[in-house]
């Protein structure tokens, strides 16, 4: 409805899912996304550690 392209709708859905999952796990969405981006830049192979339920709210 608000996206002109299918790829834009997919990107929006992914971002909204990340934000809502972070909130559901007691994390601040902005801090969680920043943590993910920093961690992925340093070690992109360890994605399991980035799942919201594996991130402690004190670390983010």
Image: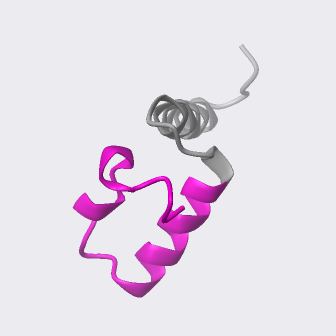
x and y percentages locating residue 24 in the rendered image: 48, 29
Residue 14 lies left or right of residue 2; in this view the side is: left
Q: Which image quarter holds the N terminus?
A: top right
Image quadrant in which you'd find residue 49: bottom left
With respect to residue 50, does 45 lie above or below?
Answer: below
**Is 22 drawn above or below residue 32 in the view shown?**
above
Decide whether residue 56 is among the magenta residues: yes
Q: Residue at x 49, y 32 (%)?
A: 17
- The answer to whether residue 33 is left or right of residue 50 is right
Q: Position of residue 58 (x, y in %)?
A: 50, 60
Residue farthest to the bottom, as pictured = 42
Name the dominant secondary structure of the magenta segment: helix
Of the pair 4 and 18, the residue shown nearer to us: 18
Question: Residue at horizontal 47%, vertical 81%?
Answer: 41
Residue 12 x %, y %:
61, 34
Given residues 47 and 11, the one toward you in this image is 47
Q: Considering the image in quadrants, where does the C terminus appear?
A: bottom right
Q: Position of residue 48 (x, y in %)?
A: 23, 59
Q: Residue at x 34, y 82 (%)?
A: 43
Magenta region: 31-60
Is 52 rendered above or below residue 4?
below
* Left or right: 56, with 48 as reference point: right
User: Does the segment drawn in magenta span residue 14?
Assistant: no
The colour style of the image is one colour
The reply, left or right, for residue 21 in relation to residue 27 is left
Residue found at x 48% / y 65%: 59
């Amino acid at each position: 409805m608000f996206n002109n392209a299918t790829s834009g709708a997919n990107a929006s859905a992914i971002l909204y899912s990340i934000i809502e999952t972070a909130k559901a796990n007691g994390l601040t969405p902005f801090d969680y996304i920043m943590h993910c981006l920093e961690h992925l830049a340093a070690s992109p192979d360890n994605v399991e550690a980035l799942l919201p339920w594996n991130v402690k709210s004190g670390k983010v």
